[in-house]
Every structure is written in C-alpha cells, then in structure tokens.
Image (spheres, rainbow, N blue to C red):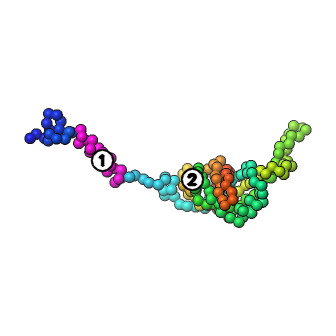
C-alpha cells in the first residue's frame, strides 16, 4: 500500500489538505491557551503608586443652596470619581472654594471691567476644588484609577446627594 495515492490522500483515506488545515487549527489553539501574551493594562505594569493632587474647576453648577453643598463636602471628606464612564475609586476632598460670579462691564473709555454679578437669584455656582488621591507615574503622565488624567479632562464626581462634572486644571505629585 502506498503512503500517498494518485488523488493526494494519505493511506487512501485522508486528504493532505485536511491534515494541513487540522494542524493549523491545532497550532492556533495551542498558541492561544499556552502562550496568552501580556495581560493587564500597560499603564499599571512596573510603576509605583504615589500621592497625587488634582485641582478642578466647576463652572455653572446649578444648585439652590451652595453653602449646604459646601457643608456636604466638609462632612463627606471623600468623593467617588468616574473617569470616562468608568468608576475610578475615591478622592479625598482637601479644599473647596466658592468663586465669585462676575460680569463684564464696558467702560466709557472702551475698556472692560469684571465686576461682581448683582443678580443673586441665578442659582449658578462656580467652585475651585482640590483633591488628594493615589496615582501612578508613567512616561505618558499620571494615571488615576487605571486611566491617564490630564489637564482639561472632565471628571464626574458622585456623592450621596450630588453628581456633577468638573474639569481638571492642574495635576501634580504631592510634596
């Protein structure tokens, strides 16, 4: 009996092409299960966690009682953060400062001045917030909760009585 017949079958039963296809499929399966590659995000491999400070600004937050919200921040001391719709842990609230609302008033000589907004019923609040958390330093920047955080990036603050967005205006290592 010949090993290979005239139609390309091994021992007259199995085609060479079928054997080759089965070997390719088997090698792919072995490669996937025995050599899976690197896992985890690149940002978390080989870096150390350090204390990080984040400054953020809130513009035009509609709230009836800004002082009550400030008291809530002082009471909670921590806030849950959400970065790009993914929970990223908690940050400690170090300080919150209410910013005065101003309006631009043109002057007779053509210049402009920023004066305090006389309207008290606007229910719009601006705040400057300072947070402390743990982050990792990579060559591309600081990573908080598995996500790179940079100036201009929106963060979502989620507390017991509030949920709003802030914009990062400064991020730095503490110390």
Whole-angstrom CA distance, mark 1 to mark 2, is 37 Å
Q: Give the main secondary structure, helix, strand or loop, of the magenta stretch.
A: helix
Q: Which residue is mark 1?
A: 27
Of 75 and 161, nearer the camera is 161
Q: Position of residue 18 (x, y in %)?
A: 24, 40
Q: Residues within 10 Å of mark 2 (few under 14, many from 20)?
A: few
- In magenta, the rendered stretch is 17-34
Give the vertical position of 173 relative to 25 (above or below).
Answer: below
- Quadrant in the picture for the C terminus: bottom right
Q: Residues within 10 Å of mark 1 (few under 14, many from 20)?
A: few
**Residue at position x 81%, y 49% from top?**
122
**Residue at position x 86%, y 40% from top?**
106
Q: Which residue is mark 2?
A: 86
Answer whether residue 118 is magenta in the image.
no
Answer whether residue 23 is magenta in the image.
yes
Give the vertical position of 76 relative to 59 (above or below).
Answer: below
């Amino acid at each position: 009996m010949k090993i290979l017949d005239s139609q390309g079958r091994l021992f007259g039963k199995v085609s060479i092409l079928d054997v080759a296809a089965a070997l390719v499929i088997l090698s792919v399966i072995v490669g996937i299960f025995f050599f899976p590659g690197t896992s985890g995000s690149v940002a978390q491999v080989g870096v150390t966690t350090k204390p990080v400070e984040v400054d953020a600004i809130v513009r035009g937050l509609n709230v009836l009682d800004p002082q009550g919200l400030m008291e809530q921040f002082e009471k909670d001391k921590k806030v849950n953060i959400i970065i790009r719709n993914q929970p990223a842990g908690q940050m400690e609230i170090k300080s919150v400062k209410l910013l005065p609302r101003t309006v631009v008033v043109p002057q007779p000589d053509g210049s402009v001045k920023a004066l305090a907004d006389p309207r008290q019923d606007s229910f719009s609040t601006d705040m400057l917030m300072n947070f402390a958390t743990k982050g990792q330093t990579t060559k591309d920047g600081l990573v908080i909760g598995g996500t790179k955080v940079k100036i201009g990036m929106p963060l979502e603050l989620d507390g017991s009585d509030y949920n709003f967005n802030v914009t990062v205006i400064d991020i730095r290592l503490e110390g």
